Image (cartoon, rainbow, N blue to C red):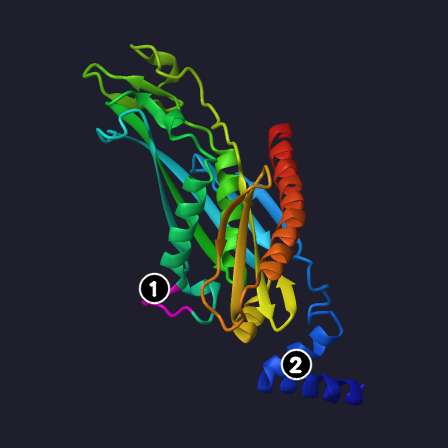
Amino acid sequence: MSNDLSSEMEVDAFRRLFPLRFHERHLQESIRPDARPLGKARDTSVALGAVASADGSALAKIGCTTMLAAIKMEVMTPTTESADEGCIAIDFHMPPICSPLVRPGRPAEAAPVISKQLSDTILSSGMINLKELSLVSGKAAWMAYLDIYCLDADGALFDAALLSAVAAFSHLQIPVVSLNDDGRVVVVSDEDGGKLEKEPVNKEKRKLKLSSIPFSLTCVLHKNYILADPTAEEESVMETILTVVLDSSFQLVSLYKPGGPVLAQTSVIQDCVALTRQRLKELQKILNEAVSDMEED
């Protein structure tokens, strides 16, 4: 027993003092410290309707990385350039509880980067037709405020954030609205439903039609190795990160590589895309099951 304990302490000390050598020893055996093969992602789950007060919400977990996404819908006046389109505003938050690296009072450096990445991905993928968010052309449209909170940051933050965002939009129910006496569009609460003077613009809560849903996989590159869905420790030790985003038709939406010492050769990118195609099928199944479970309830 004491020998086991001392050897465990030695391994832990070696891991802390020489993290790169520790991981490279595992890579030589084509295994990772958490016993995953190099190309395998962590266990993933999605739960819809996590926030009762939101119009759409979801909790997504990839390993320990946990994201809570919530959407609130508000009526706005559209711009003259996009008179018959609504709008989506995305904000990604990293409170201090998510990681010891995030300090109270100081915004996390990764937060605005991931916010921008999410906005670019969701809008460029064509997942949401912004015309569907229009109410009265030139006068009223929906503004969807999507807030994503990172509750636990243990690597592959963008993948989990995108999954939670897509799941929240899958759960979204657009509220009923009506025209008031001034001709303005107002949201109808459940209590008001039976005593409306004017006919509602939309008779019942409706769901958005989602097409070309984007899914992503982040890989860490080290020498000739490709590690899918890295933990925070793997990201910090091996530094070169590549994120591939594909839509549900397996079309490439974006490729994101924020620097790093390893060059992404064509063959490496092709291998990462192949891993993402496999992962996409897994994520589609997980999301479809979560939607089905919600509809049964």
Which is nearer the N-term, disc 1 or disc 2?
Answer: 2
Q: Quadrant of residue 126 in the image?
A: top left
In the displayed structure image, the side of residue 211 where residue 194 appears, left or right: left
**Residue 29 on image: x %, y %:** 76, 74
Instruction: Look at label 1 and name its amino acid.
Output: Pro
**Residue 276 on image: x %, y %:** 62, 51
Q: Secondary structure at mark 2?
A: helix
Residue 146 visible here: yes
The vertical placement of 194 against 207, above or below, is above
Q: Residue at x 69, y 70 (%)?
A: 32
The vertical placement of 207 against 108, above or below, is above
Q: Main secondary structure of the magenta part?
A: loop
Q: Is residue 205 magenta?
A: no
Res 107 label: 1
Q: How many marks?
A: 2
Quadrant location of the C terminus?
Answer: top right
Residue bearing the label numbered 2: 22
Q: Secondary structure at mark 1?
A: loop
Q: Nearer the viewer, mark 1 or mark 2?
A: 2
Magenta region: 102-109
| Towards the viewer: 258 or 195 | 258
Q: Residue at x 42, y 52 (%)?
A: 117
In the displayed structure image, the side of residue 271 where residue 52 appears, left or right: left
Q: CA distance from mark 1 to mark 2?
A: 32 Å
**Residue 207 on image: x %, y %:** 48, 26
Instruction: Look at label 2 and name its amino acid.
Output: Phe
Q: Is residue 103 magenta?
A: yes
